[in-house]
Amino acid sequence: MELLIALMLAVVQGITEWFPVSSSGHLALLELLFGYGEGLFFGVALHFGTLMAVFVYFGRDITNILRELLSLRFQTPNGRLGVLLVIASIPAAISGFLLREIITQISGNMGMLALGFLITSIVLLVGSAAPRQAKRRLGIFGALLIGCMQVFSLFRGISRSGTTIAAGLLAGLPEKEAVKFSYLLSIPLIFGANLVSVGNRTIPTELLWATLLTFVVSLCVMHFSFTYVLNKRENLRWIAGYVMLLAFGIFVYLVLV
């Protein structure tokens, strides 16, 4: 039974990481329903799987960005994108370090989880209503806006991709560029969080199956989401409705139980 639940968690992580619905929030809900604690290394294994999916799907972009940054060519399109990704990563890195104890203390609070889902739904609705503009190039201010919005996703229930995609739309980016920037921005956050969590320890070999399963599911879902769903901001409203229902469902559960 525990193996079945663990498989379910790996699949859920692979699906929800690339939709703006908060993967951490969904994992917390499953833990509540089944009374299953995923454990530190299991969570790291799942996130490592999603991280590898990003590297594979955007491998060429990542290689080009790193080459330009290492060559100090910051004015080229890929070099500039790399600089903006670094800038956007700073707020969450600082906030994660300063707020780590608070985040840990409230991570199991179901009321805060419901509030997080509610915030996600509102953010998605605001992002979907952002006025369409002529194609604009992302600047430092826009990157900082996206980075500051990402800070909220440190709390369970608030979607990282949801906050950053919505911020990208508000900054004037076309849908696909906002989604791509959001996905690439996940790399330093996930990598940094995993590094802080495990230090110099390694993931146990018996959890490699979780990494592999999450990787396969993530790769498929990422392509589907990026190509067919999140390229239309109208779809954000449907997703916002789903997340809002989750929030109210948890509130009702807390009142009745």
Image: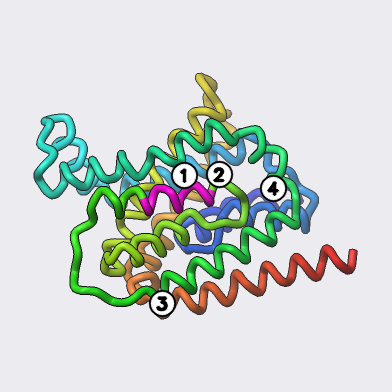
Q: Secondary structure at mark 4?
A: helix
- Is residue 146 inside the magenta stretch? yes
In this rendering, the label closer to the viewer, 4 or 1: 1
Q: Is residue 167 above or below residue 214?
A: below
User: Can you identify the residue that label 1 sits on?
Assistant: 49
The disc, 1 or 3, on the residue closer to the chain's N-terminal end is: 1
The disc, 2 or 1, on the residue closer to the chain's N-terminal end is: 1
Residue 3: give its label. Answer: 4
Q: Are marks 2 and 1 in contact (CB under 8 Å)?
A: yes
Q: Are marks 3 and 4 in contact (CB under 8 Å)?
A: no
Three-letter residue code for mark 4: Leu
Three-letter residue code for mark 3: Ala
- Mark yes or no: residue 11 visible: no
Q: Is residue 204 above or below residue 114?
A: above
The disc, 4 or 2, on the residue closer to the chain's N-terminal end is: 4
In this rendering, the label closer to the viewer, 3 or 2: 3
Q: CA distance from mark 2 to mark 1?
A: 8 Å
The disc, 3 or 4, on the residue closer to the chain's N-terminal end is: 4
The disc, 3 or 2, on the residue closer to the chain's N-terminal end is: 3
Residue at the extreme front of the image, as rendered? 141
Residue 152 coordinates in the image, percent (x, y): 53, 51
The disc, 4 or 1, on the residue closer to the chain's N-terminal end is: 4
User: Can you identify the residue that label 2 sits on?
Assistant: 210
Three-letter residue code for mark 1: Gly
| Magenta residue span | 145-153
Q: CA distance from mark 3 to mark 2?
A: 37 Å
Q: Are marks 4 and 2 in contact (CB under 8 Å)?
A: no
Residue 214 coordinates in the image, percent (x, y): 50, 50
Residue 129: give its label. Answer: 3
